[in-house]
Amino acid sequence: MTQYTDTPSDDAPDLDDGLDGYEDDESEAVRRSAGTAESSHANRHWWDRNADEYQDEHGGFLGDARFTWCPEGLDEEQARLLGDRSRLAGRTVLEIGAGAAQCSRWLAAQGARPVALDLSHRQLQHSLRIDQQLGLPPVPLVQADATVLPFADGCFDLACSAYGAVPFAADTALLMREVHRVLRPGGRWVFSVTHPVRWAFPDEPGPEGLTATASYFDRTPYVEQDDQGRAVYVEHHRTLGDRVRELTTAGFRLVDLVEPEWPEDLTAEWGGWSPLRGRHLPGTAIFVTVRT
């Protein structure tokens, strides 16, 4: 296992593998095919470029050591989707698409032994920054693609992902097989994604986001591309049935499918998530599974 130990800085990471020219200020949003290599390349650079803004905008909601599954604010402390909190101590946990590792930091506070994995170098730098600010030992970090996990078979007790990696991977069937491989038998794999039904609606927080304008069954990826047609950001859609088939084929048993309701006291918007839409449409789907 390779541990990421770079030193955080106030400067963006120095990338010399094609980032130049991938500015997305003038990007065009389209629906078109996007394979594994293109999706991974585009999303890694997008998150490196936008990690600072993302943490500035959402860091207050996410907290420094809070495990929240979704914009609806469902916390693991109450939901216990990974199991009883008292039984987390000593357990190895892989957080996939960890960002600044807020969830891993919460897990470490419960006595678990988390490893935070993310595709983005800059997101992981924010994890180191937060650990330094809090005076905590750094969360073990790994920069890697979730479809090629750099770990031995059966080395984790649990795996989790809060809106990380799964929506951005072109081959999520492979991702599920990789998670199955690194989990021990009986280990839980819990992940949250945008609720698949949202793909039929515009990603708008206001009334325009309540009218379906696309087919739920259209799996064509959402791609933002530059003026040369190069993808700078990609998301992939799967239906609920697709997800269940991916999981069961990979060797997981679906234990629960959680669709958090919008809390009455939550007034903040997050992109297309809002109190208005939350009262009418599910915004998040959380899959709770066990490795067989």
Image: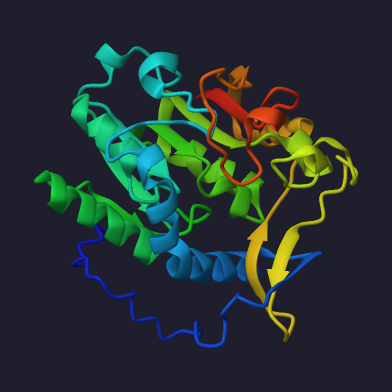
Q: Image check: 254 left or right of 78?
A: right
Say which residue appears at 78% left-offset and 43% top-offset.
199
Which image quadrant is residue 155 in?
Answer: top left
Say which residue appears at 26% left-offset and 38% top-offset.
105
Q: Nearer the viewer, residue 274 or 234?
A: 274
Q: Image check: 63 left or right of 9?
A: right
- Residue 100 lies, in percent from the top left, at 34, 50
Say which residue appears at 74% left-offset and 58% top-offset.
222
Applied colour scheme: rainbow
- Residue 60 lies, in percent from the top left, at 36, 42
In the rendered picture of this protein, how many numbered marks are placed on residues? 0
- Residue 175 lies, in percent from the top left, at 57, 47
Say which residue appears at 24% left-offset and 57% top-offset.
3
Which image quadrant is residue 2 in?
Answer: bottom left
Residue 256 visible in this rendered orientation of the protein: yes
- Residue 233 lies, in percent from the top left, at 62, 65
Residue 119 visible in this rendered orientation of the protein: no
Q: Image check: 21 left or right of 143?
A: right
Q: Nearer the viewer, residue 128 or 35?
A: 128
Q: Nearer the viewer, residue 248 or 21?
A: 21
Q: Image check: 233 left or right of 78?
A: right
Q: Residue furthest left?
A: 135
Residue 157 vertical placement versus 18 (above, below): above
Q: Quadrant of the N terminus?
A: bottom left
Which image quadrant is residue 184 in?
Answer: top left
